Amino acid sequence: MFEGLSEKLERSFKILKGQGYITEVNVADTMKEIRRALLDADVSYKIAKDVTNSIKEKALGQQILTSVKPGEMIVKIVHDELADLMGGEHVDINLKGQPAVILIAGLQGSGKTTFSAKLANYLKRKKGKTVMLVAGDVYRPAAIDQLKVLGEQVEVEVYSEDGNKNPVQIAQNAIEHARKQGKSVVIIDTAGRLAVDEEMMNEIANVKKAVSPQETLFVVDSMTGQDAVNTAKAFNDRLGFDGAVLTKLDGDTRGGAALTIRSVVEKPIKFVGIGEKMDALDVFYPKRMADRILGMGDIVSLVERAQEQYDEEEARRLQRKLAKNEFNYNDFLKQIQQIKKMGNIRDLASMIPGMDKALKGEEIDDDAFKSIEAIIYSMTPAEREDPKLLNGTRRKRIANGSGTSIVEVNRLVKQFEETAKMMRMMTTSKGKKVMRMMNAMGGRRG
């Protein structure tokens, strides 16, 4: 995510490294590089120029503290400017209403149907809502079938009417059905087109007028860059929407759409899609995204994801075992399974400050844990319970049984021992203090 932009911005900051003061000359050179980085990220020339002019003005008017280097000050100013460009503060989705109606719109191929199911999954799992999906694309039979398949995956009811080609009527009937069923949220997936046209606009306008949604979300493919911004502007000028959703952000190395859509259409980005899985959806926080663009990671989001998988009773059980030095491979396996539930491994790694840079060029497979799991499953119940049993003979048998090598088994044993040691440290008073700090960060919004 944003690899190209991050690298170019980092290069631009190097101009001020080693400089004792910010001057007209060195800040002008830095702004030139930042402007070039933004243009390469598919940000429009006007916005890139406005942003760099603002950064320059703030940098030259800044009193540099003796403890802060010029390069560090520029990074802080650029961070704040990027966050402001993307909206500054997070804007939550509006779920008022009985039921709350969310209308999903966008061009064909933008990822509307997949996002609709992801949103249903998010509202069900994280907000505790009872959700119903509505198949409102009456022109593409595959869209209805796709929504039904995705609805089954996330265990959410999908409302459709075979043979009915009136999207307004389907939407109205669906809301009435949802009301009778006591659903708290209705998500209406609508038809898309290959381009913005009058027919498309009239249809979505009629649906919106008929159902008066609490929230209208416009879904755009972030990989189309500035074209996505232009499409969003045309749609907003004609119909108006409450927020934008950027899909396929994990595949976009430029990021122009994420950076500029807020300033062009004056509507917040509310969600970003970061993968194909149904839980690969992130709430959009401008300040956190600015952190990630500048290689600072996103520890708050990482802690929040960890807290979602946190089981207090399991944590207490584990703490008791650690205190008695009884941590075993069954416990280790449970920890791995919890990490896997947190999401895409590469995305998780990018949330750790500096990790994106360290992993540049490295392939991180989502199946990275498969060999570890195979090795543990090849152990006998007694071996999993008592790690001290793993002598040379047993390790050779485990390697053969898991289709791995003795080297891999030995590596796992070492990883297990290091993990156990680290987790025991976290049960000390110092470790508990660190955990309390992380929990506090997880509760903080930004």
Image (cartoon, rainbow, N blue to C red):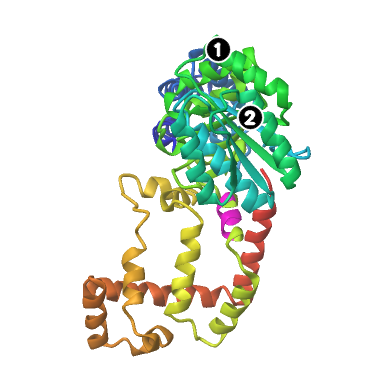
Question: Which residues fall within the magenta stretch?
Answer: 301-306
Q: Quadrant of residue 393?
A: bottom left
Question: Residue drawn 35% across and 57% down?
Answer: 367
Which residue type carries mark 1? Glu
Q: Main secondary structure of the magenta part?
A: helix
The circle drawn on residue 199 is 1
**Circle 2 SS class:** helix
For residue 16, say whether it is visible.
Answer: no
Q: Badge 2: few (under 14), some or many (20 or more) residues near its Cα, within 10 Å?
A: many
**Quadrant in which the C terminus is drawn:** top right
Q: Residue furthest front?
A: 163
Horizontal and vertical percent position of residue 261 = 56, 23
Tell which of 71 and 83 is nearer to you: 83
Question: Residue drawn 52% across and 16% down?
Answer: 230
Horizontal and vertical percent position of residue 366 = 37, 54
How far apart are the two marked residues, 2 and 1, measured between alpha carbons?
Answer: 18 Å
User: Considering only vertical position in the picture, is 314 above or below 102?
Assistant: below
Question: Residue drawn 44% across and 33% down?
Answer: 142
Which residue type carries mark 2? Ile
What residue is disc 2 on?
A: 170
User: Considering only vertical position in the picture, is 124 above or below 430?
Assistant: above
Q: Badge 1: few (under 14), some or many (20 or more) residues near its Cα, within 10 Å?
A: few
Dots 2, 1 in contact, CB < 8 A: no
For residue 299, say whether it is visible.
Answer: yes
**Circle 1 SS class:** helix
